[in-house]
Image (cartoon, rainbow, N blue to C red):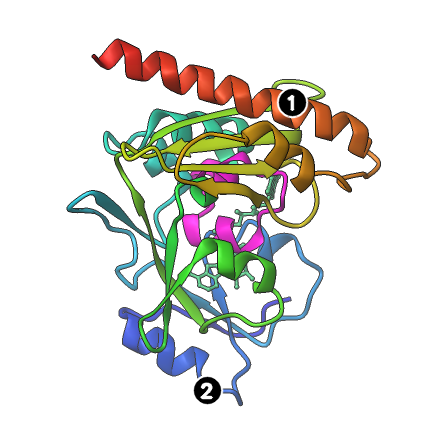
Amino acid sequence: MIEKYFRPQSVEEVLDLLMDSKKGLTPLGGGTTISRQRHEYQGVVDLQEADLDQIKIQGQRIQVGAMVRLNDLVGHPDIHPEIQRAIMIDASENIRNMATLGGWLISSSGRSITSSLLLALDTSLTWEPGNNRVRMGNWLPLREIEPPGVLMTEAEWWLRPHLAFEYVARSPKDKSILIAAVAQWGSGRTRVVLGGYGKNPIVAMDGPNDMGVDVACRDAYSEAEDEWASAQYRIQVAAKLALRCLDRIDAIRESEV
Ligand SMILES: Cc1cc2nc3c(=O)[nH]c(=O)nc-3n(C[C@H](O)[C@H](O)[C@H](O)COP(=O)(O)OP(=O)(O)OC[C@H]3O[C@@H](n4cnc5c(N)ncnc54)[C@H](O)[C@@H]3O)c2cc1C
């Protein structure tokens, strides 16, 4: 049950409310997780009017407000088609209409393709108070233990890298049991993320080129065993999926020449 509801009009007002420890308030994004929890909330701070729903291009990076709905990313010309494809697989239309990027990043599991891709793009997150910028890869393992602030305002990622993902699920719209997401920059820098297991996607490799991707994937998932798949299966298939992503990126690059 939610006892008190606030809908402030600015980030400053949001922070005043959230930082008042006597009130014990919780941020409310799209509410898709919060509304399902049987948890007693002392009160929520609805972020929908706090001007956190902008999408801006800044040089070679894109800045996306934490309150941008997943469906607004799907329709946006500057959002990479692989991110749009991931969102369409991860979330049903109802969830896409309600869930926000901030809420998704905070509550999605290791089985989210969207979060895996954003991690591959080396996304940074801005938290308040303090305009505290943290890399998603540093934040994810600590997100439940030590949040870098009370409010995520924005996520920012590179526009230019080539991007591809491959996944395995029991059916096309089911939650993935294995995800490989690869981002490759013009310099050759290659970041490989694995998902489909555990609480968070993980970075298997971040190197100056794509050498050793298969070995890195096997190492990263050597203990990735759960009720959905054995570690042996994930080790073998993760490496193959990552190599398939690289083949797709090579084909795109060749078609651009
Ligand atoms: C039917 C259904 C299917 C789902 N399927 C999947 C799935 O396949 N894979 C997967 O990974 N997840 C799945 N989820 C979970 C999904 O990730 C979340 O429900 C959704 O992304 C939450 O977004 P929201 O904007 O509604 O957040 P809310 O429910 O509003 O909030 C979620 C959490 O984030 C906090 N929060 C929200 N915004 C901010 C902010 N800006 N700053 C600080 N804290 C904030 C809230 O306080 C709360 O703790 C599913 C959920 C549902 C209901």
Kind of residue at disc 2 = Asp
Give the quadrant of residue 128: bottom left
Majority secondary structure in the magenta region: helix
In this view of the protein, can residue 173 be seen by the observer? no
Hey, which residue is sitting farthest bottom in the picture?
22
For marks 2 and 1, give the one nearer the viewer: 1
Horizontally, residue 159 falls left or right of residue 231, namely left
Secondary structure under badge 1?
Answer: strand
Kind of residue at disc 1 = Val
Secondary structure under badge 2?
Answer: loop
- Point 46% across, 87% down: residue: 20
Provide residue 217's location: percent of width, then percent of height: 62, 34
In the rendered image, the quadrant that contains the C terminus is top left
State whether residue 194 is above or below residue 250: below
Q: Is mark 2 within 8 Å of ligand 1?
A: no
State whether residue 126 is above or below residue 247: below
